[in-house]
Image: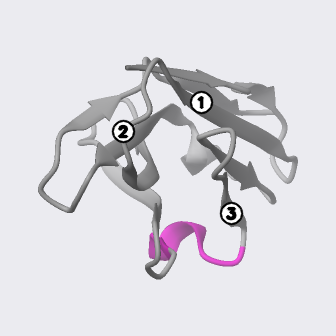
Amino acid sequence: VQLQASGGGLVQPGGSLRLSCEASGGTEPINSMDWYRQAPGKERELVAEFPSGGSIAYADSVKGRFIISRDYAKRTVYLQMNYLKPEDTAVYFCHVRYYSDLGPRYWGQGTLVTVSS
């Protein structure tokens, strides 16, 4: 199983970025695909989660600005980030859990998002 994340970069405050992450190398049923982030000196936090057959959820800090979506056929998860703020600066990680809420989980390598003028 490989998780290939892309789409990070430098953007000015108020700008937008779209992250994507493909789960390749396997055909196991995916339970959820999510995005986490880790800012310098802080713990990793959940940004948005997209469980299969469940309800999408967002961290309060990104509600109304970020949108998570999935392409089930491509086994890919996206994160559309709008109205970016400097405090959104972090390394963003995709996370995939297979089979069930207690199934095996995998992390992508992380993609850096920097919001700065």
In the image, is 24 to the left or to the right of 45?
A: right
Amino acid on which the number 1 mark rests in the picture? Glu
Mark 2 is surrounded, within 10 Å at the Cα level, by few (under 14), some (14 to 19) or many (20 or more) other residues, namely: few
First in sequence: mark 1 vs mark 2? 1
Alpha carbon separation for disc pair 1 and 2: 14 Å
Instruction: Tell me if mark 1 has few (under 14), some (14-19) or many (20+) residues whose alpha carbon lies within 10 angstroms of its own.
Output: many
Between 19 and 23, the residue placed more toward the observer is: 23
Horizontal side of 98 relative to 82 (left or right) equals left
Segment tinted magenta in the rendering: 57-64
Find residue 115 and report its image quarter.
top right
Number of the front mark, 1 or 2: 2
Q: Secondary structure at mark 3?
A: strand
> x, y percentage for residue 113?
63, 30
Tell me the quarter of the image containing the N terminus.
top left
Instruction: Report the Cα–Cα distance between label 3 and label 2.
Output: 28 Å
Picture coordinates of residue 58, whole percent (x, y): 49, 72
Q: Which residue is tagged 3?
A: 66
Residue 99 image offset from top left, x and y in percent: 26, 53
Residue bearing the label numbered 1 = 22
* Residue 55 location (% of width, % of height): 47, 82
The three-letter amino acid code for the residue at tag 2 is: Glu
Residue that label 2 marks: 28
Is 75 above or below relative to 99?
A: above
User: Going by the image, does 41 lie left or right of 116?
Assistant: left
